[in-house]
Image (tube, rainbow, N blue to C red):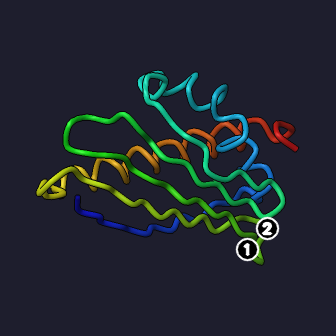
Amino acid sequence: MGVFSFTDEYASSIPPARLFKALIVDSHNLILFHCSQLDSMKNRVDELNEETFAYKHTMIDLEERFESIAYEVKLEPTPDGGSKNTMTSTYYVKGNVKLEEEDIKAGKERALGMYKIAEAYLLQNPNAYV
């Protein structure tokens, strides 16, 4: 089994507490309402810390090329009142399967899409998740 890990950072004008509530704690309502294809994926929550805005989860029972994909998300406040969001993705591939560039790109686009949905909702609804 091969293991490949990547870290990305996203900046947001939304404070980490609001973004964490919308993106992580209530994602089953907010995100799945907008991205219904994610509803069929099996996820295991490994850590959920609402005080430090840290979240770890693992996607399991994936297609035949992957054993699992683990995500570690950390939201931190920025001086301007927004947040810096760091996400580390770790892909566990089966056998000698090589991780292709399109796999990495698809994962990054899916993660960024979820951030953008939550961010757009929070900007349009300033009293939500306060």
Residue at 49% of width from left, 47% of height from top?
Answer: 58
Q: Please give the residue where the numbered disc 1 appears in the rendered image.
A: 78
Q: Position of residue 102 (x, y in %)?
A: 19, 51
What kind of residue is marked 2? Gly
Q: Please give the residue where the numbered disc 2 appears in the rendered image.
A: 81
As rendered, which of 58 and 50 lies closer to the eye?
A: 58
Identify the secondary structure beneath mark 2. Answer: loop
Cα distance in 3D space between marks 2 and 1: 6 Å
What kind of residue is marked 1? Thr
Residue at 71% of width from left, 44% of height from top?
Answer: 123
Contact? badges 2 and 1 (CB < 8 Å) = yes
Side of 54 where 43 appears, left or right: left
Side of 130 where 34 appears, left or right: left
Identify the secondary structure beneath mark 1. Answer: loop
Residue at the limit of the structure toward the bottom, as seen here:
79
As rendered, which of 65 and 114 lies closer to the eye?
A: 65
Q: Position of residue 21 (x, y in %)?
A: 76, 44
